[in-house]
Amino acid sequence: MTDESASVVETGPQDRPLRVLHVSQPTTGGVAGYVAQTVAAQRRRGWEVFVACPRDGALPRDLRAEGVPHHLWEAGRAPGPGTLDEARMLRRIIAVVRPDVVHLHSSKAGLAGRLPGVATRRPVIFQPHGWSWLSGGGVLARASAWWERRAAHRTDAIVCVGEGERRQGTGKGIRDRLWTIRNGVDLSRFPPADQRERELARERLGLPQGVPLVVCLGRVTRQKGQDILLDAWDRVGQACPDAELVIVGSGDALDELRRRGPGDRVRFVPEAVVPRDWYAAANVVTLPSRWEGLPLVALEALAVGRSVVASRIPGLTEVVTSDVGALVTCGDADELARALALRLQDPGLAASEAEAAGVRVRDFDMAETQLRLCALTLAVAMGTADAPALSSPVPVS
């Protein structure tokens, strides 16, 4: 998370390096990866950057390796009786750090950090990474939407990672202070992988060389839809009996899915330290998610040059086009199975989609994403985020 090209130090409202506190309950998966990317980009600008998050997972490990100040914020994923204690803990962290901007990532930080008295008189950015009401239905979804509308008035900017997420927000009555800054992928970390790299990756991972392989990376939860994928996999096996599926990640649904896994044709492995190896090894990468913001897994898979089969939902429809893979009806195991089997049986189709993926992903360069986010963060700190010149955030020179 360093860059020797950094030269100019941008100052904040007190004529010193801007001080930013990022708060995240997720420490694995896409949100954690996004936070790590953002911390790196802001440190390259000479800003003072701090992170509050739980102790476990990849994010605190990466922070320690790079010498980024980490404040322990032990928070659970779901709201509950302990939420007020989590908010008080976060208030104490904010008092110690004294940031110019508090950047809240995902729903738990967005809840705790926007309760009255927690970030008082501090500019606040909230980034949903998938709106809170999407995780439930009925009363819970209505309560979540009500809270997001109320909390929006205590937020200086709400960053949507894609146009689909923005439309979901406006559809629930959240219309002010919304900014769209699409997720991006570090193209230098995820260059295209050819056939030789596929063979080397499989060798490193202990995978057979000639077997058609589908890979699904991400937290193993209801959101990510691995249960739908397992429903589809029996059907894939009928068309491609030698195909294998690897589910990479951990989460609250892992034990249940392990019990369902159909024999030796499905492997479960822990969260990947080097995710590019799994993309390189795959013939097809799949995201059978029920909801998303704009997932980094899809962007990383395209960057490596892999065909992607995903749910037709906001966030994924912005990334996966017909020339790079397939979108299937969310929750439809039969349609998912057909799309996967087609690409496993037709290497020529998967290869043409892989070639197109390398072109498509250029529209999602992380460097542009971080330039725009840094521009907005500086504007929020200076109190100029509503200026006409920033109606669409632009890079800071």
Image (cartoon, rainbow, N blue to C red):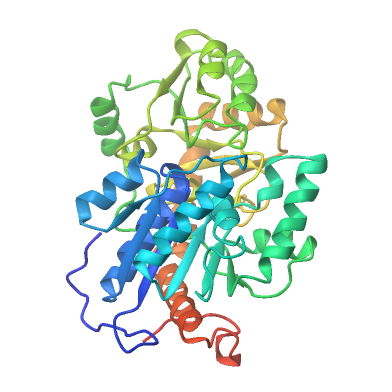
The answer, for residue 37, to whether it is visible in the render is yes
Q: Nearer the viewer, residue 367 or 9?
A: 9
Q: Quadrant of the N terminus?
A: bottom left
Residue furthest out toward the left: 4
Q: Nearer the viewer, residue 77 or 355?
A: 77
Task: State which quadrant residue 213 falls in.
Answer: top left
x then y, percent, for residue 261: 53, 14
x then y, percent, for residue 130: 61, 52
Q: Quadrant of the C terminus?
A: bottom left
Taking the image as shown, residue 33 lies to the left or right of residue 326, namely left
Q: Nearer the viewer, residue 397 or 244?
A: 397
Q: Residue at x 68, y 41 (%)?
A: 135
x then y, percent, for residue 358: 43, 55
Q: Residue at x 41, y 44 (%)?
A: 27
The answer, for residue 359, to whether it is visible in the render is no
Tell me if residue 202 comes above or below residue 256 in the rendering: below
Taking the image as shown, residue 39 lies to the left or right of residue 172, namely left
Q: Residue at x 27, y 58 (%)?
A: 69
